[in-house]
Image (tube, rainbow, N blue to C red):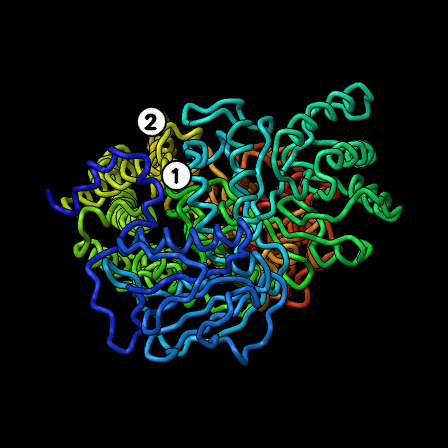
Amino acid sequence: MSARRVVRALGLCALLALGSSATPLFAQAPAAAALLDLHRAVIVTSPRATPRERKAVQVLVEEVQKRTLVTLPVQTTWPAAGRPIISVGRIGTLPGGGPALATAGLATPGAEGFQIAAGITGQAPHVTVAGADQRGVLFGVGRLLRELRLDRGAIALTPGLRLSTTPQTSLRGHQLGYRPKTNSYDGWTVAMWDQYIRDLAIFGTNAIELIPPRSDDDPDSPHFTLPPMEMMVEMSRIADAYGLDVWIWYPALDKDYGDPATVDLAVKEWADVFRRLPRIDAILVPGGDPGHTEPRHMFALLERQTASLRTFHPNATMWLSPQGFTVDWMNQFYDLMAKHPAWLTGLVFGPQVRDPLTTLREKIDSRYKIRLYPDITHSLRAQYPVPDWDIAHAQTSNREPINPRPLDQTAIYRALDEYAVGFITYSEGCNDDVNKIVWSSLGWDRDAEPLETLRQFSRYFIGDGHTDRFAQGLLALERNWRGPLLTNTGVDATLQQFQAMERAAAPRDLQNWRVQQALYRAYYDAYVRQRLIAERALEADAMAHLAGSRNTGALAAVDKAAAALGRRTATPTSAALRARVGELAEALFQSIHMQLAVKPYGAIAVGRGATLDTIDMPLNDRVWLADRFTEIRAMATEHERLAAIEKILTWTDPGPGGFYDDLGDPMRQPHLVRGPGPTTDPGSFRSAAVGFGYRAGWRLSWMTHAESFYEGKVKMRYDGLDPTARYRVAIVYAGDVYSFTRKLRLDADGTTEVHGWTTKDGHPKRAEFDIPASATADGALTLTWRQEPGAGGAGRGNQIAEVWLMRAPAGTAQ
């Protein structure tokens, strides 16, 4: 069996699920002679080490052993001279009488910080990890593991390593929800959770966030390995063993918290969860998404819940996020905050908070901390979608794909971090694994370079020999999603890069789920690009047949066009890519329980990471054209049929002196006023963003749109118009299924109404309106769209797909 095909047999052992910590990937080069050789080292720790310090040492021993098959001995006394040493403990607690510590002269770290120093003491290597506190010891061990060069029988470290470091952010966490509505977590065992929480801690994570048994999910999942309450207890216990904070994301789901009886029942229900968990440090209650409780009732409920919480966990804190609030509820929320509720510790800025973070910070008393709750898991219809994503990616990868976005996540973090005390990210599974590591690294040091973080990720999880190659591969996967896929030849180069690593892999190496994820994305993107090229070529052939309809006749042209669109696009190469994607989907289900299809893997929905179900979505307009062909065939006269064909052929033609914008296509929106953009405005509070919607039978140009949120505006600017001409504007309103009832208004130059409040009806169609002559008399025009103010939820609705600005024939009257 070839290494490439061996993944078919990976389903034998669920314990491989966190194979990231197994033997390093690929054949490794021998350690260079200049490295410190630690394969015979003794770990020396304090006889007064606390249980959590001993846990940190356990992590070091176990993670080294998994990668090298070497078990380092641990003792509380110094070994004989000449034996390599790794000393681990809190500063000042290591046993006396030993060699001089190499940490002398290093700055004293602050809370959770540590020192690491490596050198030669006498004739033997000596590495010291000295933590400022218990967490500092764990995080110091994590940093050491990220620096070590590990291979079978070999443990080495670069000499001269000396650092003292303290995290810049006090809260660095990730939500880990054991619930059905995830793409993998619901299939994890206690051992898998232990390993993953450990992996996060190694990169500086100091908190996890759990989800209670009752949320907006189904109560059960076919993948559950334990009942939700039992697993919640286990995860709290695991985090406590590592000394990590435990948060609970606890939605208030009951219908009416203005009813005292409902509140009493809720207090009792939540108390049962509080009582059973061994550790709780904080509770976050979202104001919406899910839940929909008026702020005055929410505040009264949470005051009761806080008192209840502290009977079981006296130092636990209560946090609230104003998610989903309408403008009226947001104003009520600000009024309540002005009364300085004593039970509340802080606020959380997450998806569907209608005010920018800067506004929230300005309006809230500084006694209340603000925590970030960034969505790192979704790629569209999200708080931070992929900027200017190609429609082919959106159609296939959809909302929850495997999504390493190290550069995007770095920009988001750096745009927001100064206003918050830290973060716990919003995650729906291990699809965002790389993004978690990037956030944890930035939380420690906001200036951390993404490439260096990825190198540490690759060295630790994949293996020293491919530290740079795998890191560069992850960056290449992010570049796969940049710009038009049709012309992005880098997608093919990315696949070749990963195929070269894949060919070098032994069968056991392909059990590493992080490798499998990267391979899946590389093959997936390349397959989609091949399909895109082929399907766009078929559409071009079809349009050529339609263009000849006056010579061949309308019906003959339609038949030829339909036949062209129906031709198979599969080639031996694309078929092989498609098959490999399927193999890797099976591998990922077996290794980490990723559910990449509804059947056979049990994904809860196509949009919840089931990218195998959408890999063959149409990438041209063949579905829309088929409907038009049906209409044409039913027409009574040749004149009607030819006119309908002409409409298809000239769809984007605005006529002489006119302009056309496909506002969802970044390459065809020259008149869109984009605003600051995602680097400084990642939530698009002041920028126009590209969004996506879908219904069967839509044109591709209707499936993408420009959008703004809440009271934000979408603007188009035209210069160089003829001041003596008259103009009309044609518009197609589309959008996602959640915004079809929203009302929009269009103004010219900010003051002149082009059309009043108009409700989108979910059936895109072209509508035309006159532009007042006064608006173009200066040779320029600004069109401004807005939606009815005050909306709650995600604030979406102001979504425009296509715009034609057409010059009216000379002599046309207003």
Q: Is residue 771 visible?
A: yes
- The part of the image, by quadrant, that contains residue 291 is top right
Q: Residues within 10 Å of mark 1 (few under 14, many from 20)?
A: few
Q: Residues within 10 Å of mark 2 (few under 14, many from 20)?
A: some
Q: Is residue 93 left or right of residue 195?
A: right
Disc 1 on helix, strand or loop?
helix
Tell me whether circle 2 and circle 1 mark residues in contact (CB < 8 Å). no
Q: x%, y% of residue 515? A: 30, 50
- The picture places residue 196, in percent across and down from the top left corner, at 44, 45
- Is there any visible trace of residue 439 in the rendered image? no
What residue did someone put label 2 on? 599
Q: Nearer the viewer, residue 808 or 326?
A: 326
Q: Residue furthest left?
A: 1
Distance between the alpha carbons at the discs numbered 2 and 1? 44 Å
Observer-nearest of 662 and 130: 130
Compared to residue 293, the image places residue 475 above or below, namely below
Q: Position of residue 505 (x, y in %)?
A: 19, 53
Split into 4 quadrants, where in the image is the N terminus? Answer: top left
Q: Amino acid at mark 1?
A: Ala
Q: Which quarter of the figure has residue 513? A: top left
The dot on residue 643 is 1
- Which callout, 2 or 1, points to the residue nearer the camera? 2
Closest to the observer, 374 or 352: 374
Residue at 78%, 58% in the rendered image: 362
| Mark 2 or mark 1: whose residue is earlier in sequence | 2
Q: In the image, 111: left or right of 24?
A: right
Q: Amino acid at mark 2?
A: Lys
Give SS at disc 2. loop
Q: Residue at x 64, y 47 (%)?
A: 350
